[in-house]
Image (cartoon, rainbow, N blue to C red):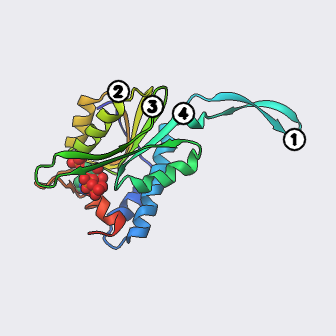
Amino acid sequence: MENIINVKHPLLTNLVSKLRSIYTNSYDFRKYLSEVGRILLVEALKNEKMKEKELEIWIGKRSFPVLEEEKYVFIPILRAGLPMLDGVLEMIPLAKSGFLAIKRNEETLESVLYYDRVPPLKGKTAVILDPMVATGGSLDYAINVVKEKNPERIISLNVIGAPEGLKRISEKHPDVQVYIAQIDEKLNDKGYIIPGIGDAGDRAFNTG
Ligand code: PRP
Ligand code: URA
């Protein structure tokens, strides 16, 4: 699973532990998801190529490295990926955003797409955002939709994954770099991650 990068940092682990607590309310839950998203993005773009741009500064004109912010397209998977968008947009405010809504059928565990509002991705770096990789069905679906739009590169930022789902993504999409904060033990017989954080969408939007 070479393309699965388990990002290790005490600040990340601390945030994930806060997400696990049943006493974390939905406001804080969204805030922690946003912070995890931001830290994962920092790691994912660690070796990013930069462009030289001439800037006017206090001593005249000089060239400095800048990121091409509009090259990035953030794609949260609704609902639970939405709070992660705030965090990454704080880091790259001129990035574009696209939206995919995918719901897992809780009986069959099949993923169903019900909204696709992703802009053209040719020449772009697509960054998919979803806290949970359980069976991997939703992320697999999202990656397939994104690949049809021919981006230059695809990155996925995720909070917690189960080994089963991550193996599926690694085998089907070895070309996608997955940055994940925590790899947990397993799935239960209902497809929930153990120990996990429960239903991330319900917890983020207070519908549990
Ligand atoms: C959750 C989560 C992932 C998916 C993971 O979404 O945000 O998208 O489940 O499960 P999988 O790997 O088995 O596909 P959910 O379907 O609960 O929708 P929601 O975010 O609207 O609650
Ligand atoms: N979706 C969630 O929100 N949590 C899980 O553990 C599995 C799927």
Q: Earlier in the sequence, mark 4 or mark 3?
A: 4
Which circle marks residue 58 in the picture?
A: 1
Residue matched to label 4: 71
Q: Secondary structure at mark 4?
A: helix
Judged from the image, the quadrant occupied by ligand 2 is bottom left
- Whether tag 2 and tag 1 are in contact, CB under 8 A, the answer is no
Single out the mark in the foreground, 4 or 3: 3
Dot 2 amino acid type: Asp
Q: Kindly tell me whether residue 184 is visible in this rendering.
A: no
Q: CA distance from mark 4 to mark 1?
A: 29 Å
Q: CA distance from mark 4 to mark 3?
A: 9 Å
Q: CA distance from mark 1 to mark 3?
A: 37 Å
Q: Secondary structure at mark 2?
A: loop
Q: Nearer the viewer, residue 170 or 68?
A: 68
Residue matched to label 2: 175
Counting from the top left corner in percent of width and height, residue 43 is at 49, 41
Cβ at disc 4 under 8 Å from ligand 1 = no
Residue matched to label 3: 121
Which image quadrant for residue 150?
Answer: top left
Counting from the top left corner in percent of width and height, residue 50 is at 62, 29
Q: Kindly tell me whether residue 149 is visible in this rendering.
A: yes
